Image (cartoon, grey):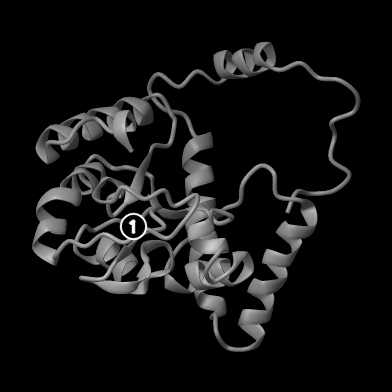
Amino acid sequence: VGVRSFGSDPQLVARHVAAYVEGLQEAGVAACAKHYPGHGEVTGDSHLELPTAGIDRETLFARALPPFAAAVEAGVRSVMTAHIRFPALDEQPATISGPLIALLRSELGFDGVVMTDALEMRAIAGTVGLEEGAVQAVAAGADALCLGAERSPEEVARVREALVAAVREGRLSEERLDEAAGRVAGLAAWASSPHPGHDLEAGAEAARRALRVEGDVSLPASPL
């Protein structure tokens, strides 16, 4: 993680995290705290492998979780999971771990959107697989699945088909899908509602200036 973190002191990081969340969200931008429950506990790169954090539960609570607790206290709208194993709590990586996501919900009190890290990273795609990883993530409690920009429409369709098949097979409940969809819809509604310092016209103008459009970019149908 290195310079992608606010530092190595949990309390200092927690204060910076809370301030960053509040600043973003006052301007109408939904903040995302990542990578839960703590990517700084490993040196391995989850793009290339499945890292394991060999720390005990007490160390996890004292060192890794305080910044996430601060983010939740500050009202963070989303939290991204880490593709990392924490054997002190579960053998599965956090992204597909029911106990770890339940910990975020219960002990930290988070009720917003749980988003996965990119599922095509080798920590997931190279172990359980892209489609199976998507199914297991939603079943574990994730609400939104992150699929990298280079994923083809066919790959995205296979993820959707895997979720449908899991429901038909009884491995994934419709209620869990409804809950996930409801949280994502709630986040979208929040982001599109007025906020102090949220200037929709300025945002639209900035977006227009940032884009160069060539050809017809309209969609033939609703996006999946």
- Is 130 situated above or below 65? below
Q: Residue lying at the far bottom in this picture: please name it.
A: 169
Residue 182 horizontal/vertical position (percent): 51, 60
Residue 187, position as x, y percentages in the image = 48, 46
Specify few, some or many for label 1: CA neighbours under 10 Å numbering under 14, 14-19, or 20 or more.
some
Q: How many labels does the image show?
A: 1
Q: Image quadrant of residue 37?
A: bottom left
Counting from the top left corner in percent of width and height, residue 175 is at 51, 76
Q: Which of 16 and 112 is in front in this view?
A: 16
The residue under the point 24% across, 50% down is: 41
Residue 50 can be seen, yes or no: yes
Asked if residue 87 lies left or right of residue 143, the reply is left
Q: Tell whether 166 sits left or right of 46.
A: right
Q: Does 215 sit above or below residue 39?
A: above
> Residue tagged by mark 1?
111
Q: What amino acid does circle 1 point to?
A: Asp
Q: Answer whether residue 144 is visible to the viewer in this image.
A: no
Rendered residue at 56%/66% (across/down) = 134
* Residue placed most toward the observer, 21 or 92: 92
Residue that appears at 28% across and 51% down = 42
Quarter occupied by the N terminus: top left
User: Element type at marker 1?
Assistant: loop
Quadrant including the C terminus: bottom right
Residue 45 is situated, as x and y percent measured from the top left of the image, at 41, 48
Relative placement, left or right, of 80 versus 10 is right
Task: Identify whether 202 is placed above or below 99.
Answer: above
x 24%, y 30%: residue:
6
